[in-house]
Image (cartoon, rainbow, N blue to C red):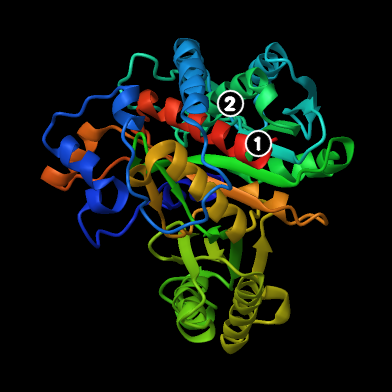
Amino acid sequence: MSTHHSSLESKSSDLCFPEREPFSRRYCPVSLAKTAARGTWKVNFLSIFGAVLTAASPCAQPDSQASAEMKARVDQSINREYPSLEALYKHLHSHPELSLQEMETARRIADELEKAGFEVTRNVGGHGLVGVLRNGSGPTILVRTDLDGLPVQEQTGVAYASTVQTTDEKGDTVSVMHACGHDVHMTVFVGTARLLKELKDHWRGTLVMIGQPAEERGKGARAMLNDGLFKRFPVPDYCIALHSNAAMLAGTVGYVEGFSLANVDSVDITIRGVGGHGAWPHATKDPIVLAAQTILALQTIVSREISPLDPAVVTVGSIHGGSKHNIIADEVRLQLTLRSYSDDVRNHTIDAIRRITRGLAEAAGLPEKLHPIVALQDEHTPATFNDPELTRRLAGVFQDWIGGDRVLKQQPVMGGEDFGMYGRTESKTPICMFWLGTVDPELIRKHEETGVALPTLHSSQFRPLPEPTIRTGVRAMTAVVLELAKK
């Protein structure tokens, strides 16, 4: 889940959910939550997939349900591949790389695709990679994983925890961690590639599997598209991805129709004034007072300018100004994060920030040359809009393959992901990103008993449970492609 590093801490809580009802009823299948709460959870493949359960909510069913024989074959393949997939996961987890530095990670994933029989092109949009598997006439399906880690010092305590330190683009030494589940995404991605090559007799079309860099910086999708992703390679009929969910039980999947993730913008505002001595404020134009007025005025954008039916967020995450008790500074710097779903709301919010800051500066008597500087950062990620028809089709696949009680209809959140860019090209390709549960049932039990919050995405303590998370992800993604490209 992408973040802009200037607001890492605020973004790390993007996927925290309000406590409206017991956690287990919102993010865990009821039967599994009760088992987890009793402390009798058994993590094994049959317990996750063995039962035929009632669908969690109405959705489009696949044209024909997968046969028991096909499911058994997929499960057998997953069982065979699982030891090497878990080993791959632990390797990736232990060797994270920052955005725009994913050289070794990209090399490993590209090597895995080549071993699976894909034609692989490396260095697409930086460290991006594209694997193509052609299998006759049929739809083209793009499956995407992200590659990058985060500047977070891991505190999970697992044996394979990252101890990596590196130098960031500013020259600072930082710790690196896969704190957003991209290691899970890559492992599922490789497992899916292996299975779909093995199952070529059961689908037709072209599979395009991409490893995308710099998701956390909101730059990777744009870079790959600008480097000809949809021109040098087959244009997809569908784009599919999954994302780890730090609030859903391992062994479950979730989906959201329509807007799933938000537009994300970072804005830097420099409030300028005329500094001086704190004992002579009348001889100054105090930028700290003006900054305080600005912060309060910005809150009216959402409350008084945006329709209550249109979600939007304007958060001032950082304010810095002044150096000493008795000195009135010349400037104050603010850092904002903006969230929205619609482009109209996004544009209105940005325009309103410029208008309000300029108006307050004029009211303070500042000349135009000292009006605030409003800088929109280039790490914008557009909202992720899951094509409703495609999403309902996938939900039906999940209910068939995963079990309805383990398929959870979720609410949209204000986190951000640049996956949405793949649906905004001229081809207007239908896209869908679904959620993959990762949470250890023991953590859920402790959460229910003590109220201690679960580690969120981007937390130094975020620790996905490898099994059944990886198995579930491979099964779900494989089933999706088999449905969309079925013979």
State which quadrant residue 123 falls in. top right
Place of residue 357 in the rendered image (x, y in percent of width and height, measured from the top left): 59, 77
Image quadrant containing the C terminus: top right
Quick one: label 1, few (<14), some, or many (20+) residues within 10 Å?
A: many
Regarding mark 1 in the picture, which secondary structure is present there? strand
Q: Is residue 335 above or below residue 211?
A: below
Distance from disc 2 to disc 1, alpha carbons, whole Å, reads 9 Å
Viewer-proximal residue, 355 or 100? 100
Which element carries disc 2, helix, strand or loop? Answer: helix
Residue 135: quarter of image: top right
Residue 308 in the image: x percent, y percent? 46, 81
Residue annotated with mark 1: 143
Residue drawn at x 66%, y 56% is: 377
Residue 481 visible in this rendered orientation of the protein: yes
> Does 225 sit left or right of 141 as displayed?
right
Viewer-closest of 189 and 282: 189
Q: Quadrant of residue 245?
A: top left
> Within 10 angstroms of label 2, few (less than 14), some, or many (20 or more) residues?
many
Question: Considering only order in the chain, which callout, 1 or 2, is on the residue closer to the N terminus?
Answer: 1
Q: Amino acid at mark 2?
A: Thr
The amino acid marked with disc number 1 is: Val
Residue placed at 43% from the left, 44% from the top? 399
Whole-percent x and y of residue 390? 61, 53
Compared to residue 56, the image places residue 53 above or below, namely above
Is there CB contact under 8 Å for labels 2 and 1?
A: yes
Q: Residue at x 61, y 85 (%)?
A: 359
Q: Does residue 457 appear in the picture of this structure?
A: no
In the image, residue 46 sits, relative to residue 260, either above or below, namely above
Give the label on residue 25, or none: none
| Residue position marked by numbered label 2 in the rendering | 192
